[in-house]
Image (cartoon, rainbow, N blue to C red):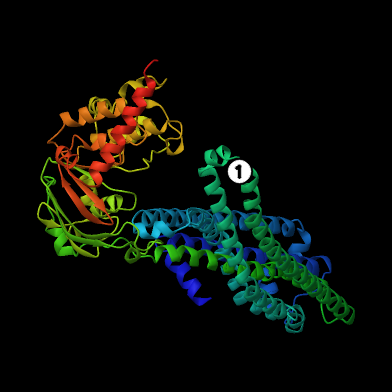
């Protein structure tokens, strides 16, 4: 438990002054609330019952009577007592509001900083972490778990302070009024506190199970909504409903266990609290008949018990919320404890190039295995001794069967993963010595599955260059043969597209992604099967536009359609992570090997297709 309070204390950094002011308000609220029963007790005993103050009068009561002008004056102006009680309660309410506002302001600031930190950290974690992470669970940790921490900091931290103040001040105060009555009034408070602690120990693991079940439930919902078109296309709604039922039932069962434990706690604590009030009332009434206690004193003790018992009962809730917060903090720490993408040592970063790359790439004896990067499939798409050179402005095409290592090579060039052995050099500098952010700023990439954000088309195109003027945006769109299509939309470049660009066709998404990469004006351009959803005529137009830009950027084109690769300066053919052929399109199409076989197959299929389209 101490470690959790240590974490909470560290989270308060930058907001401790606000919590200190809130604690000061809490002290005032406690003092003012204590004053209300004292005024009532003094009024009942010395104004209504007309007792005479003497040496046996408790010092607090005697001091209060002097403050009110004495017992005789209080009897003559009895309206002063209720007025004083109302003023004390109203002032306590004002300070209580200020306390809550300060605590909420601090907790909201902490939650915002925590969310910002989590979001930033997730954006800097290695690709291998995101390959294995559950997106729904990450969303749960960044939203629900942070909200749990915020609620605890906003409410329960002050409740802990309140309980501490009561423990420090209530006992001495009551002892000064009547020691025997204090012992009676506190007889069940200690067992109630111990029960709250035992309950906390029992319920803590249940909170962890509930949080994990909720995370699994969120993951299923997120996956279903992401693939809703596939679900409908294959008429899998009933299967998805059945799949959803299992994690939903588990979350319900765990929540019911938690609710049952909480119900037991509140029921038992209610019985104990009411029992304490009843015991105090019975003993106090008996002592009043014996003359050992006054009515006003019994009123004060019952009032103080009403003030004290709620925070004591709340200790169980505080401990419960502490358990829930402890689980949430643990889940948040699991993310924050994952190391970020490693960067080169500071001296190498300081010596890094100030200008952009020329586009020269040198690869020597490159080895990479997915198992070494922590990926779930070992060996697939591994690179085994890859070596080649690309000159500035050259266009290099990369061909190979699925799993040959084409996309893996692209990931290594982007430093999404780090290679095991060998060397990759940009302009003579080892890739591993260059900052990742700087490397990625030099590369424009169109991935196999282009991702578009739920923003306007203009914002999506400006992803790589936020300051790009409109005429350059339009030029890039023309190069990707998407400009006329965009103008056909009602809002043109201001058209808001759906999540993941779902409102666009597959070919339109690819062309927007190509335009986005071209607009970035990078020294290195990578097209990873970027035209698989584009028809042959549009593809030809895009390739011609890219041909006109030849020499402006080193271009790596990964594709399965050989028509996409035919315009490249040079072609390399991969198989099982090795280069098995290299040359121009004209050279490879005449040499025996994989490239020629694929060329013959594709040209034969196209020829047969065109023949079938001819009218009879």
Residue sitting farthest toward the right: 289
Q: Residue placed at 69% from the left, 62% from the top?
A: 253
Do we see residue 383 in this rendering? yes
Horizontally, residue 235 falls left or right of residue 506, namely right
Horizontally, residue 466 falls left or right of residue 255, namely left
Nearer-the-camera pick, 234 or 348: 234
Horizontally, residue 388 falls left or right of residue 66, namely left
Do we see residue 462 in this rendering? no
Nearer-the-camera pick, 4 or 339: 339
In the rendered image, residue 245, in percent from the top left (x then y), is placed at 66, 53
In the rendered image, residue 400, in percent from the top left (x then y), is placed at 28, 48
Horizontally, residue 485 falls left or right of residue 322, namely left
In the rendered image, residue 107, in percent from the top left (x then y), is placed at 49, 57
* SS type, badge 1: loop
Q: Residues within 10 Å of mark 1 (few under 14, many from 20)?
A: few
In the rendered image, residue 77, in percent from the top left (x then y), is placed at 75, 58
Task: Give the residue at mark 1.
Answer: 236
Q: Locate the C terminus by quadrant.
A: top left
Q: In this picture, is 27 found above or below 2?
A: above
């Amino acid at each position: 438990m101490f470690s959790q309070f240590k974490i909470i204390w560290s989270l308060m950094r930058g907001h401790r002054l606000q919590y200190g002011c809130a604690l000061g308000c809490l002290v005032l609220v406690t003092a003012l609330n204590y004053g209300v029963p004292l005024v009532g007790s003094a009024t009942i005993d010395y104004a209504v019952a007309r007792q005479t103050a003497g040496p046996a009068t408790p010092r607090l009561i005697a001091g209060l009577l002097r403050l009110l002008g004495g017992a005789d004056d209080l009897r003559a102006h009895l309206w002063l007592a209720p007025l004083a009680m109302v003023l004390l309660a109203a002032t306590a309410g004002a300070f209580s509001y200020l306390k809550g506002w300060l605590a909420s302001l601090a907790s909201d600031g902490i939650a915002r900083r925590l969310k910002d930190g989590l979001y930033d950290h997730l954006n800097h974690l290695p690709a291998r972490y995101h390959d294995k992470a559950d997106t729904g669970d990450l969303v749960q940790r960044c939203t629900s778990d942070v909200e749990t921490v915020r609620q605890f900091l906003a409410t329960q931290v002050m409740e802990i302070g309140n309980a501490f103040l009561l423990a420090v001040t209530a006992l001495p105060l009551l002892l000064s009024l009547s020691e025997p009555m204090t012992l009676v009034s506190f007889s069940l408070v200690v067992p109630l506190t111990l029960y709250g602690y035992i309950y906390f120990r029992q319920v803590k693991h249940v909170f962890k199970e509930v949080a994990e079940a909720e995370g699994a439930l969120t993951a299923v919902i997120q996956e279903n909504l992401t693939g809703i078109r596939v679900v409908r296309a294959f008429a899998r709604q009933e299967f998805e409903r059945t799949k959803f039922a299992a994690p939903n039932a588990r979350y319900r069962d765990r929540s019911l266990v938690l609710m049952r434990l909480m119900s037991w706690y509140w029921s038992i604590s209610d019985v104990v609290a009411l029992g304490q009030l009843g015991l105090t009332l019975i003993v106090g009434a008996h002592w009043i008949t014996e003359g050992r206690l006054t009515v006003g004193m019994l009123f004060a003790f019952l009032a103080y018990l009403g003030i004290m018992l709620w925070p004591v009962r709340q200790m169980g809730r505080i401990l419960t919320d502490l358990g829930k917060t402890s689980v949430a903090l643990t889940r948040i720490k699991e993310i924050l404890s994952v190391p970020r993408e490693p960067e080169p040592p500071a001296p190498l970063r300081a010596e890094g190039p100030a200008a952009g790359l020329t586009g020269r790439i040198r690869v020597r004896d490159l080895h990479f295995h997915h198992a070494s990067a922590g990926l779930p499939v070992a060996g697939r798409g591994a690179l085994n001794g890859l070596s080649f050179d690309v000159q500035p402005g050259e266009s290099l095409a990369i061909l190979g069967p699925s799993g040959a290592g084409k996309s893996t090579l692209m990931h290594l060039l982007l430093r999404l993963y780090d290679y095991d052995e060998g060397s990759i050099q940009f302009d003579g500098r080892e890739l591993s010595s260059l900052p990742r952010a700087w490397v990625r700023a030099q590369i424009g990439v169109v991935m196999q599955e282009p991702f578009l954000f739920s923003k306007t088309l203009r914002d999506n195109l400006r992803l790589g260059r936020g300051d790009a003027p409109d005429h350059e945006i339009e030029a890039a769109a023309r190069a990707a043969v998407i400009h006329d299509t965009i103008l056909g939309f009602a809002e043109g470049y201001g058209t808001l597209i759906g999540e993941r660009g779902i409102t666009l066709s597959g070919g339109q998404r690819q062309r927007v992604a190509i335009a986005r990469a071209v607009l970035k004006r990078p020294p290195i351009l990578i097209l990873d099967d970027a035209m698989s959803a584009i028809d042959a005529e549009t593809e030809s137009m895009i390739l011609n536009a890219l041909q006109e830009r030849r020499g402006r950027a080193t271009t790596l084109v990964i594709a399965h359609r050989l028509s996409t690769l035919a315009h490249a300066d040079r072609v390399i053919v991969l198989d099982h992570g090795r280069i098995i052929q290299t040359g121009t399109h004209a050279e490879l199409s005449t040499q025996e090997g994989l490239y020629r076989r694929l060329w013959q197959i594709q040209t034969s299929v196209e020829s047969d297709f065109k023949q079938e389209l001819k009218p009879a």
